Amino acid sequence: MNKLALPASEWRIAWQRTALILAASTVGSWVMSNLVMMSLNEGMNTVGTVLALGMPTALGGPILLFLQVRSAQLRDANRRLEKLASTDWLTDCLNRRAFTSRVSSSLGQTDGYGTLLVIDADHFKTVNDRFGHERGDEVLQLIAGAIRDSVRDGDLVGRIGGEEFGVFLKDAGHDIANAAAERIRAAVNALFVTSDGIAQRLSVSIGGAVCAGDSGFSELFQIADRRLYEAKHAGRNRVELGRNAGDADLAAMSAAIS
């Protein structure tokens, strides 16, 4: 792998910073040389001008460019490490830790609200048993792609369990969230997994909770997860999304816990 491989934007930044620093140092060199010569009652001749302008460029240019490139490489490496630490290796979604953290952060904002969806692949064990675990991994990738294609750029998509995904729809109330959940359900239901002439249509069940008041991630997740199981028990391949995660939900959740 080429150690100098960088995105075009990083190369552009490196060249721009090098040019700016060189321009400043060259002008500074010329000004200082003039001041020194004037203090000696001597004027700047052609050779002195060439040296004052050329030396910083000839000597400092390559060093400055090298340092800027190394700095860009470090920035790029840090970005890659951050992505690896927060991304699920199979589906390229956020991993559970990163998803939970980012949703909690969004909910913690003063005007933060939205809807949490919990999505579970239907009959996934059957897929693994019938087609094998390798095809099962491909199915998870297909489902993840369908989810990403069905939500907005600013929404959060994470893999939070084996065949379970989470979606946080920022600033989305019931109607927007329900439409997004139905898009996800329909997109997945249009997919098939096939092998040796055997085909199986894919589907997901979705439970959701609309944030109301000061609900935190844990509360929303438990409510959305309960609605997911309602969708499963109602026949799968469906969406269960109440009006909001309000007092009735919290009371039911507390009763279930106690």
Image: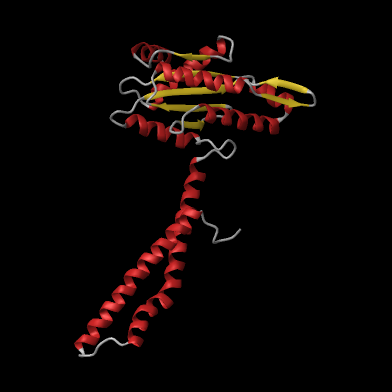
Which of the two residues, 75 or 190, is positioned nearer the viewer here?
Answer: 190
Up the image or down, 231 lies above or below 137; here it is above
Q: Position of residue 13 (x, y in %)?
A: 42, 58
Q: How is the image coloured?
A: secondary structure
Work out which quarter of the rendered image holds the N terminus and state it: bottom right
Point out the residue furthest to the bottom here.
41
Question: Would you say 12 lies left or right of 32 here?
Answer: right
Marker count (numbered) = 0
Residue occupying the point 50% across, 49% down: 80
- Percent position of residue 234, x then y: 56, 9
Left or right side of 145 for 226 = left
Residue 73 position within the rendered picture, expressed as x and y whole percent measured from the top left: 48, 58
Q: Residue at x 45, y 67 (%)?
A: 65
- Say whether residue 162 is left or right of residue 46: right
Identify whether 229 is placed above or below 24. Answer: above
* Image quadrant in which you'd find residue 41: bottom left
Which residue is at the far front? 46
Q: Position of residue 115 (x, y in %)?
A: 41, 23
Q: Residue furthest top?
A: 234
Quadrant of res 236: top right
